[in-house]
Image (cartoon, grey):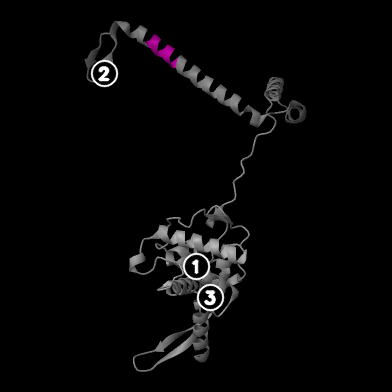
């Protein structure tokens, strides 16, 4: 094909008619291919959008051709054996693939918004890799089991050992289930509720005259302090002890869930509330 270039404009010369004819043929093939793809997609979706002429065509005044086409689709679907479109049911999310989270109940109404367990906070593993530190109060939406795992990583030599703490919590949950026969997640929630102090004391005044004043504790701080006390009690109990950290954590959670004074967290909570009561 001979081309003549003039000021960035291409002229086709003698073969202009042939070029236009080829362009029309290519365009026609493109249109036909698009129509064919649409037709195949419509045929694939037809079982989901069957229009029964006897039920809807007369009411909606559909044309006869559409009613006939609907009957053809219905006949084809019956021949293929497709009666109902299958619906996908999401499986229940269970912690570690074993512990159900939907039946866990938070008995303290003030902590319902700060102990994240169910619905969108339900996870298979306590490792969501969320950035809960970038905004105030965002950590309230962190799953409570993951917060327990994160608190077990305290002190420098344990920083970043998330897999180790997840394994410890998993073993502790197995021990709790063997000893109590209950859902270990429910035991953890009860332990957090019982271990959070409701009243504390703060320093009031300036340099020379300083006194302590009793104050109420915010719900989020109650959860934070409860988790810290539970992990501290388990860590101190396992230090220079033949018992493993998982066994000590299981004992701490069971005693705290029962409200027993054998729990480190319960003893510290009672001490804080007693000091606050004396400073009212």
Residue shown at the point (22%, 15%) measured from the top left:
5
Q: Residue furthest top?
A: 14
Residue hosting label 3: 195
Mark sitting earlier along the chain (3/1): 3
Pointer 3 with pointer 2, Cβ within 8 A: no
Distance between mark 3 and mark 1 Cα atoms: 19 Å
Q: Residue furthest front?
A: 242
Q: Nearer the viewer, mark 1 or mark 2?
A: 1
Badge 1, how many Cα within 10 Å: few under 14, some, many 20+?
many
**Residue 5, relative to residue 74: is it above or below?**
above
Q: Nearer the viewer, mark 3 or mark 1?
A: 1
Can I make out residue 143 in this image? no
- What is the count of numbered marks? 3
In the rendered structure, the answer to whether residue 196 lies left or right of residue 133 reads: right
Identify the disc placed on residue 247.
1
**Range of the magenta residues?**
20-27
- Residue 22 falls within the magenta-colored stretch: yes
Q: Position of residue 18 (x, y in %)?
A: 36, 7
Q: Position of residue 250 (x, y in %)?
A: 52, 68
Mark sitting earlier along the chain (3/2): 2
Q: Nearer the viewer, residue 83 or 6?
A: 83
Distance between mark 1 and mark 2 Cα atoms: 84 Å
Q: Nearer the viewer, residue 9 or 261?
A: 261
Residue shown at the point (67%, 24%) measured from the top left:
80
Where disc 3 sits, the SS reads helix
Residue hosting label 2: 9
Q: Nearer the viewer, residue 211 or 52?
A: 211
């Amino acid at each position: 094909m001979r081309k003549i270039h003039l000021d960035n404009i291409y002229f086709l010369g003698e073969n202009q008619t042939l070029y236009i004819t080829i362009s029309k043929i290519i365009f026609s093939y493109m249109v036909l291919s698009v129509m064919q793809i649409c037709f195949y997609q419509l045929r694939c979706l037809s079982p989901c959008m069957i229009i029964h002429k006897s039920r809807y065509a007369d009411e909606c005044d559909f044309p006869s051709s559409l009613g006939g086409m609907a009957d053809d689709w219905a006949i084809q679907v019956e021949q293929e054996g497709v009666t109902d479109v299958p619906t996908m049911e999401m499986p229940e999310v269970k912690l570690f693939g074993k512990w159900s989270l939907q039946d866990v109940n938070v008995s303290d109404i003030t902590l319902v918004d700060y102990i994240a367990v169910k619905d969108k906070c339900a996870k298979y593993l306590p490792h969501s890799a969320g950035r809960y530190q970038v905004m105030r109060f965002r950590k309230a939406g962190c799953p409570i089991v993951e917060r327990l795992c994160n608190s077990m990583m305290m002190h420098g030599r344990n920083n970043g050992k998330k897999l180790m703490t997840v394994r410890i919590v998993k073993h502790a949950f197995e021990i709790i289930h063997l000893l109590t026969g209950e859902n270990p997640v429910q035991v953890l929630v009860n332990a957090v509720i019982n271990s959070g102090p409701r009243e504390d004391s703060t320093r009031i005044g300036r340099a020379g005259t300083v006194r302590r004043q009793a104050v109420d504790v915010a719900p989020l701080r109650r959860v934070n302090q409860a988790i810290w006390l539970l992990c501290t009690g388990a860590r101190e109990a396992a230090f220079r002890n033949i018992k493993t950290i998982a066994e000590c954590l299981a004992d701490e959670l069971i005693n705290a869930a029962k409200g027993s004074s054998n729990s480190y967290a319960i003893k510290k909570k009672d001490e804080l509330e007693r000091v606050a009561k004396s400073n009212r």
